[in-house]
Image (cartoon, rainbow, N blue to C red):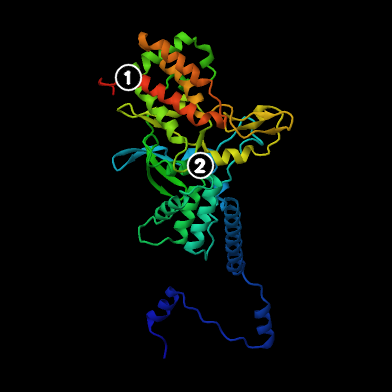
């Protein structure tokens, strides 16, 4: 019986085909040896292309990982400045966000003066470190940085309390790595040591080696903000006039100066040792809206133990070879050709040199002569240990008393 009329047509429309079985072995051999059509090679070629593409992606990803897996390669200083927001609002407060890869104290000699800080790689502590071992590790680190002080165990306890970022009463390995990275930051260590002091910016938050501080205070030193090449071109009279026109009124400047002198006191024989100001420039300081002094940048303040360790046994030809940071300079023993341990200029002498240009222009006539005399005396102080204790304290006390007498019982106090 033949197929229905539409059945063959339907099979043709759907593409159905039927091949007859070969009638002979020769016909079968001919069928098997017949070359495949060109499109038969496409699936294998496509697989090869996909494999090569995947291999290329894998190799490229591995190269990128190997290059940037090191934190020091990923976050160099100039890159950090390009991608990290340095100021902003946090909980309706002006804050400064600081990135932890900036290089620490450096010197004019660049290559072998103040040691350059190694960038943190978050490689400590290692897995399996107990909390007791981490406590001992932190204590050893702080001893190396600040000296062997009886107050260090309390500071270690503060560090461990900070390490508990999520406040779950335990310190995880990730939290320990983060707080260890923070401790490598000289400024963070200073902020931690000076948290109870009035004139250092308060620490507001932290994670990894990023941290937040109070917003940068108002700049008090307008002439210092000029480009260095322009400053020598300005006559002293014009500099004084600019300071008077653009800066706060003289009584406010006196109040700011008193705060700066108090900050020098805070750095000297505090709970966590003595600290040196190793870049004494007016651009690093500022004031609040109520004209209370605030140190805006602590990156160039160094612990005494760190400076002395750098100077100890250092070979030198001149005193410039004995410079830590920008201006923490010790004398060179020409006979022994080694740096001495005491600095040529202490913090107070360097600060008084700055205050001469800041306070004398516009000072009240009945105060100018005595103020000038005391500031000149202050700038001649040396860093010898025999002078530091009583003499420095006496000079600093006289200066503060002189300024307070002029502004006390007024709206400026």
Q: Earlier in the sequence, mark 1 or mark 2?
A: 2
Q: Nearer the viewer, residue 42 or 129?
A: 129
Q: Nearer the viewer, mark 1 or mark 2?
A: 1
Residue 7 lies, in percent from the top left, at 40, 81
Is residue 111 among the parts visible in the rendering?
Answer: yes
Q: Is residue 171 left or right of residue 38?
A: left
Q: Is residue 111 above or below residue 245?
A: below
Residue 177 lies, in percent from the top left, at 49, 55
Q: Is residue 30 above or below residue 355?
A: below
Q: Is residue 62 left or right of residue 163?
A: right
- Give the crowd class for mark 2: few <14, some 14-19, many >=20 residues within 10 Å: many
Q: Which residue in the structure is indicated by mark 1?
A: 405
Q: Which residue in the structure is indicated by mark 2?
A: 186
Q: Is residue 170 above or below residue 145?
A: below
| Rendering quarter of residue 164 | bottom left
Residue 214 lies, in percent from the top left, at 36, 38
Q: Nearer the viewer, residue 407 or 203?
A: 407
Number of numbered discs on residues? 2
Quadrant where the image shows the N terminus = bottom left
- Give the crowd class for mark 1: few <14, some 14-19, many >=20 residues within 10 Å: few
- The residue sitting at 48% across, 58% down in the picture is 135
- The residue sitting at 37% across, 40% down in the picture is 202
Q: CA distance from mark 1 to mark 2?
A: 37 Å
Q: Tag 2, which secondary structure?
A: helix
Q: Nearer the viewer, residue 100 or 70?
A: 100
| Rendering quarter of residue 266 | top left
Q: Is residue 341 left or right of residue 410?
A: right
């Amino acid at each position: 019986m033949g197929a229905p009329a539409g059945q063959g047509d339907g099979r043709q429309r759907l593409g159905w085909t039927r091949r007859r079985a070969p009638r002979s072995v020769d016909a079968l051999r001919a069928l098997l040896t017949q070359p495949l059509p060109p499109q038969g090679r496409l699936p294998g070629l496509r697989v090869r292309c996909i494999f090569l593409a995947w291999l290329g992606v894998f190799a490229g990803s591995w190269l990128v990982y190997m290059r940037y897996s090191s934190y020091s390669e990923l976050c160099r200083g100039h890159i950090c400045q390009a991608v990290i927001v340095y100021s902003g609002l946090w909980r309706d407060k002006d804050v400064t966000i600081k990135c932890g890869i900036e290089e620490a104290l450096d010197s004019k000699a660049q290559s072998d003066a103040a040691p350059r800080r190694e960038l943190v790689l978050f490689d400590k502590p290692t897995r399996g470190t107990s909390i007791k071992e981490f406590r001992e590790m932190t204590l050893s680190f702080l001893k190396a940085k600040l000296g062997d002080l009886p107050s260090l165990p309390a500071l270690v306890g503060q560090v461990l309390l900070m390490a508990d970022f999520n406040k779950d009463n335990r310190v995880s390995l990730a939290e320990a790595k983060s707080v260890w990275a923070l401790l490598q930051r000289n400024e963070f260590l200073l902020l931690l040591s000076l948290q109870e002091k009035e004139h250092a910016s308060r620490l507001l938050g932290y994670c990894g080696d990023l941290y937040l501080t109070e917003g940068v205070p108002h700049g008090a030193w307008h002439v210092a903000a000029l480009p260095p090449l322009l400053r020598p071109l300005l006559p002293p009279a014009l500099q004084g006039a600019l300071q008077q026109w653009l800066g706060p009124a003289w009584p406010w400047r006196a109040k700011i100066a008193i705060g700066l002198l108090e900050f020098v006191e805070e750095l000297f024989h505090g709970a966590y040792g003595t600290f040196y100001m190793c870049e004494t420039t007016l651009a690093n300081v500022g004031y609040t809206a109520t004209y209370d002094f605030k140190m805006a940048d602590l990156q160039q303040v160094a612990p005494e133990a760190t400076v002395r360790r750098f100077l100890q046994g250092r070979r030198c030809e001149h005193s410039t070879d004995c410079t830590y940071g920008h201006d923490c300079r010790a004398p060179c023993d020409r006979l022994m050709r080694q740096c001495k341990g005491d600095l040529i200029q202490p913090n107070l002498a360097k600060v008084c040199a700055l205050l001469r240009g800041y306070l004398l222009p516009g000072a009240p006539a009945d105060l100018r002569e005595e103020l000038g005399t005391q500031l000149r005396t202050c700038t001649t102080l040396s860093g010898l240990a025999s002078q530091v204790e009583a003499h420095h304290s006496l000079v600093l006390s006289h200066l503060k008393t002189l300024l307070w007498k002029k502004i006390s019982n007024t709206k400026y106090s």
